[in-house]
Image (cartoon, grey):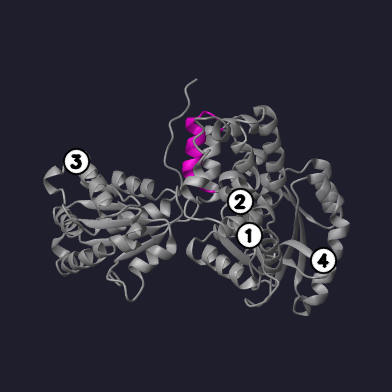
């Protein structure tokens, strides 16, 4: 039986946004940003395909000097049959883009953030001159420019900084997030199965990065068992994801950035003092240096986030650090060392070890998945809880831990949830969790006249586990319940 062809999944709202821009029939300058592999290029391709726009030129800018960039541009121009427009310098490159746009082409420039490099900075001044002329002729210009980039701060510096040549020149912009869980379920329903265990396993590995799911599809392992998927995707010499993190995330990071990322990946929920102690024990350093590294990882690369317990002030000192990207977290915490050891240790024990450690890492991944499901269901008007604010967790120095705090201010309902990957541990720990709920409510007198709901959540609940949770006064939920209707 032949497998079904891969399609384009999700992103309907984003496709419609681009189609609306293309239908204007006039000059536009669109920025699309988002993490690498998130599907920026595929999104543009899908919109162009749907509208039947064939006059498009795609250029991927290398991390190089002007000569390297121009050489690459010449190669792309030759691919699109545009040898007669080959530019000799960066100024001519900007002018050639303008010429293509006037002729009705959509020009797509990928990895646009590399023009933030000092050696390429002059290009943005040349492009500003051309863009300003195109804007003055907008109604007579049938084409447009789309720039794609993956490092938010560098894209912002090029296009949003008041001192930048291209400041205030964009006509449209879009931030591309991960695929939503409904789109992942669609992929699994078509090409594998949407069993809770498979959804958690894949989401904890890949979250909503469409390229990784397609890589699994092309390797014929999207519906394989866990260890076979790990083998094909990470542990053979031809594995497509074996060098993914090193190539796309970590090549610009060295030393203590890498040290901090690994620690946060292996200790999700660590504190500032935890990081200080770790860096000082590993290298000579001080808290000020650690704070600087964390700032770069948070603000420039968007790799780390600092979360506060519900109701805490933004400046509170009890924040916890997490890696924002599931793939980077699982790579650094689980897969990096075993995949680097394949030439020195037997393969099967390595894969088994990675699978076991990955299952342990799925505990935190499951909490994240449940929060995303609550948000997605609320956004789509599905399910039994309508959120009116960001979903949170709660913790304090007394040891109180609540995985999920969902608020509906309008109906004055608070739902406090315990999330466990193991259903037996979930049910067995409910009495202890009751104590956490009582301590939390004593500290929040403003919730005294609210309806308090408690939920017990696992990937899959047996009839017995569900009954035990309900008899203890909990709303019993598993991934089958929480994906219905998506």
User: 110 above or below 314?
Assistant: above
Q: Work out whether 233 lies above or below 278.
A: above
Instruction: Return the residue at label 3.
Output: 78
Instruction: Determine contact: label 1, label 3, CB under 8 Å.
Output: no
Q: Of marks 1 and 3, which one's residue comes earlier in the chain?
A: 3
Residue 450 percent across, percent down from the top left: 75, 73
Does residue 385 sit above or below 220 in this rendering? below
Dot 1 alpha-carbon crowd within 10 angstroms: few under 14, some 14 to 19, many 20 or more: many
**Mark with earlier residue (1, 4):** 1
* Crowd tier of the residue under label 3, counting other residues whose Cα lies within 10 Å: few below 14, some 14–19, many 20 or above: some
Q: CA distance from mark 3 to mark 2?
A: 40 Å
Residue 318 image position (x, y, % from top left): 71, 72
Q: Which residue is mark 1?
A: 322
Q: Is residue 356 left or right of residue 426?
A: left
Q: Which residues are magenta?
A: 208-222
Residue for badge 2? 329
Residue 142: x, y in percent? 17, 57
Please say if the residues under marks 1 and 2 sit with CB atoms less than 8 Å apart. yes
Using the numbered discs, state the Cα–Cα distance from disc 1 to disc 4 in whole angstroms. 19 Å
Magenta-drawn stretch contains 224: no
Residue 385 screen position, x and y as percent: 66, 61
SS at circle 3 = helix
């Amino acid at each position: 039986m032949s497998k079904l062809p891969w399609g384009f999944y999700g992103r309907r709202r984003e496709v419609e946004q681009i189609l609306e821009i293309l239908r204007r029939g006039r000059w536009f300058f669109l920025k699309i940003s988002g993490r690498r592999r998130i599907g920026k290029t595929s999104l543009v391709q899908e919109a162009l395909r749907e509208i039947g726009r064939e006059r498009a030129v795609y250029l991927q800018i290398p991390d190089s000097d002007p000569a390297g960039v121009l050489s690459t541009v010449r190669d792309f121009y030759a691919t699109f049959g545009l040898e007669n427009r080959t530019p000799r310098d960066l100024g001519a490159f900007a002018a050639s883009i303008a010429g293509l746009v006037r002729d009705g082409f959509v020009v797509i420039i990928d990895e646009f953030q590399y023009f933030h490099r000092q050696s390429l900075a002059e290009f943005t001044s040349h492009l500003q001159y051309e863009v300003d002329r195109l804007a003055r002729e907008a109604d007579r210009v049938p084409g447009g420019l789309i720039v794609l980039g993956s490092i938010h701060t560098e894209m912002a510096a090029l296009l949003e900084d008041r001192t930048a040549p291209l400041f205030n020149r964009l006509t449209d912009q879009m931030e591309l997030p991960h695929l939503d869980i409904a789109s992942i379920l669609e992929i699994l329903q078509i090409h594998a199965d949407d069993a809770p265990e498979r959804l958690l396993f894949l989401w904890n590995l890949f979250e909503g990065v469409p390229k990784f799911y397609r890589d699994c599809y092309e390797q014929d392992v999207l519906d394989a068992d866990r260890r076979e998927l790990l083998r094909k995707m990470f542990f053979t010499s031809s594995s497509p994801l074996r060098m993914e993190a090193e190539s796309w995330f970590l090549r610009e990071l060295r030393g203590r950035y890498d040290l901090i990322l690994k620690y946060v990946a292996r200790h999700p929920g660590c504190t500032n003092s935890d990081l200080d102690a770790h860096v000082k024990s590993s290298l000579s350093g001080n808290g000020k240096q650690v704070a600087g590294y964390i700032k770069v990882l948070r603000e420039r690369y968007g790799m780390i986030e600092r979360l506060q317990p519900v109701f805490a002030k933004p400046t509170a000192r009890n924040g916890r650090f997490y890696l924002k990207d599931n793939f980077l977290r699982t790579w650094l915490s689980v897969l990096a060392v075993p995949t680097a050891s394949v030439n020195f240790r037997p393969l099967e024990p390595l894969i088994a070890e990675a699978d076991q450690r990955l299952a342990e890492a799925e505990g935190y991944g499951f909490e994240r998945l449940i929060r995303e499901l609550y948000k997605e269901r609320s956004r789509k008007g599905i399910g039994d809880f309508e959120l009116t604010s960001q979903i949170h967790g709660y913790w304090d120095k007394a040891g109180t831990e609540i995985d999920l705090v969902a608020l509906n201010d309008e109906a004055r309902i608070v739902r406090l949830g315990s999330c466990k990957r193991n259903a037996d541990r979930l049910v067995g720990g409910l009495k202890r969790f009751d104590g956490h709920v009582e301590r939390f409510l004593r500290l929040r007198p403003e919730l005294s006249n609210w309806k308090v709901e408690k939920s017990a959540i696992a990937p899959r609940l047996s009839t017995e586990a569900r009954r035990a949770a309900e008899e203890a006064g909990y709303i019993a939920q598993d991934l089958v319940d929480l994906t219905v209707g998506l």
